[in-house]
Image (tube, rainbow, N blue to C red):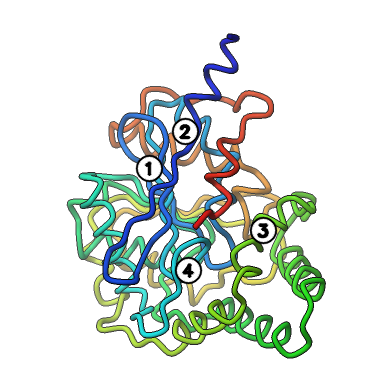
Amino acid sequence: MSALILFLMMSLGTACPQEVRTGEILNVVTAGDGPAVVLLPGLSGCAYGYRQILVPLQAAGLRTVIIEPLGYGGSSRPRQADYSLTAQADRIAAVLDSLQLKDCLVVGHGLAASMALRLAYRRADLVAGIVSIEGAGAESAATPGVTGALKLGGLVAKLGGGRILRDKYAASLAKASGDPAWIDRRTLGRYLRNIDRDMSAFITAVKAMAAAKEPEALHANLGRIGCPVRLMIGTAPHDGRLDESDLAPLRQELPDFREIPVSGAGHFIFEEQPQAVVTQITALAESIGRAAATPDTAPEGASGNEEDLACAR
């Protein structure tokens, strides 16, 4: 057996759904050994979206733990659940407690970055550092992205047809990207798999997210976050780009905050320029004593276990 095959086998992820409350099941994919990097997909993505960065992170001596928040990807979508960002952070904490993990480096994409920030001040023992990918300190889940997802779901439900969903969704991803070349048929199918399975449940969950009320303001608690926070921002024009109103509270309140511009990228930096994401994660991991080495690139063809990463439920 070749060294490459052995290396790829070591990188495979294992899906291990975690029930945090009755009917609330989070899809969790784990792989590797060592200190944990917790990866939180955004609403428009899923576990599969992180496939290109898993092997190099594991090669750096890190354990990867992907957690899809409630209503995201392959996680359950119960009607009566609390979909506030604070409740989502508490569910993530419950998963980490179940896995007996502490001092993790947490990576959040888009809206999930706000969950990571809440997790950091509510459970400081669980978070040693944060890498945000195009995500600021949202005070509510009722963001333009959630509103857009709700409109898309309503349109598809009214007109019917998977083709409409696929075309509209692909167009929205392209508008949010600096370089949309990553949006091929296979990737689009993986991103849409769980939405396609039950559009009604998806619409119900997104409605609940938009209506959810936060028990406390995030901005008032940013100063309590003692760990380093790094924000990766795509510099290409794209839908959903962060503006001054998004960035000002982070700049003013976070004790250890730095912005990392990524030239030519849009909202999906881990798809468009995955090595840039690997570099930032491993650099922060090394600075807090979490990684053994920083690899330059992943082996050709390495992408992890696609069945486990396909937002499997």
Mark sitting on residue 111: 4
Looking at the rendered image, the quarter that the N terminus falls into is top right
- In the image, taking residue 243 as reference, residue 174 lies left or right, namely right
3 or 2: tag closer to the N-terminus? 2
Residues at circles 3 and 2 in contact by the CB criterion of under 8 Å: no
Q: Amino acid at mark 1?
A: Val
Q: Nearer the viewer, residue 107 or 99?
A: 99
Gap in angstroms between the C-alphas marked 4 and 3: 15 Å
Label 4 secondary element: loop
Q: Amino acid at mark 4?
A: Leu
> Residue at 56% of width from left, 11% of height from top?
3
- Percent across and percent down for residue 86 are 30, 74
4 or 1: tag closer to the N-terminus? 1
Q: Which residue is mark 1?
A: 37
181 lies above or below 75: above
Gap in angstroms between the C-alphas marked 2 and 1: 8 Å
Gap in angstroms between the C-alphas marked 3 and 2: 22 Å
1 or 3: tag closer to the N-terminus? 1
Q: Which residue is mark 3?
A: 266
Q: Which residue is mark 2?
A: 57
- Percent across and percent down for residue 309 are 55, 46
Tell me which corner region of the image, top left, top right, bottom left or bottom right, holds residue 36: top left
